[in-house]
């Protein structure tokens, strides 16, 4: 609604992204927490927004949830916006390119492992 439009104009995460990040942020700090989120209801919701991370890490790997949370909470606004807009197309393009997937996975790992 209106809050989402205002957040978009201000370059902030969506209301959903901000809420989900707040709810899941502390919980996903561990591999067990991220794994639980990935297999639970929040993981189902997050998966709509993280096609590329799910592809390069695998749906059963909790690192894709950690990347999702990094993207929503810590990534630069311009990156979050581009990723959210193009993730589905990028994942589709990367699907048959294992070497590129490895490069993307390593880059994402550096982001989530600080």
Image (spheres, grey):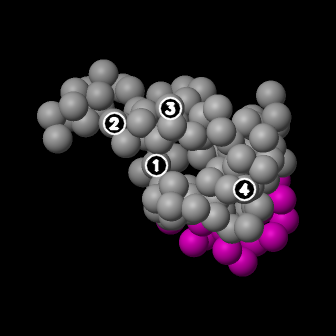
Q: Are marks 4 and 2 in contact (CB under 8 Å)?
A: no
Q: Is residue 90 above or below residue 25?
A: below
- The image shows residue 74 at horizontal and vertical percentages of 59, 27
Location of the C terminus by quadrant is: top right
- According to the image, label 1 marks what residue? 84
Give the Cα distance between marks 2 and 1: 14 Å
Q: Is residue 85 above or below residue 10?
A: below
Give the Cα distance between marks 1 and 3: 19 Å
Q: Secondary structure at mark 4?
A: helix
Mark 1 or mark 3, earlier in chain: 3
Name the residue rendered at 64%, 64% in the picture. 39
Q: Which mark is residue 22?
A: 3
Location of the N terminus by quadrant is: top left
Name the residue rendered at 72%, 77% in the picture. 96
- The image shows residue 57 at horizontal and vertical percentages of 76, 61
Q: Which mark is residue 15?
A: 2
Mark 2 or mark 1, earlier in chain: 2
Mark 3 or mark 4, earlier in chain: 3
Q: In the figure, residue 50 lies in which quadrant?
A: bottom right
Give the Cα distance between marks 3 and 4: 17 Å
Q: Secondary structure at mark 1?
A: helix
Give the Cα distance between marks 3 and 2: 11 Å
- According to the image, label 4 marks what residue? 35
Q: Which residues are magenta?
A: 89-104
Query: Between tags 3 and 2, which lies in front?
Result: 3
Q: Secondary structure at mark 3?
A: helix
Q: Is residue 98 above or below residue 31?
A: below
């Amino acid at each position: 609604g209106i809050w989402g439009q205002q957040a978009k104009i201000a370059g902030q995460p969506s209301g959903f992204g901000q809420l989900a990040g707040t709810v899941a942020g502390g919980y996903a700090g561990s591999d067990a927490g991220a794994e639980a989120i990935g297999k639970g209801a929040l993981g189902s919701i997050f998966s709509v927004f993280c096609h590329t991370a799910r592809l390069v890490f695998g749906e059963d790997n909790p690192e894709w949830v950690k990347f999702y949370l990094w993207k929503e909470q810590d990534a630069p606004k311009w990156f979050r916006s581009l990723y959210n807009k193009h993730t589905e197309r990028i994942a589709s393009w990367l699907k048959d390119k294992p070497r590129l997937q490895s490069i993307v996975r390593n880059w994402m790992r550096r982001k989530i492992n600080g």
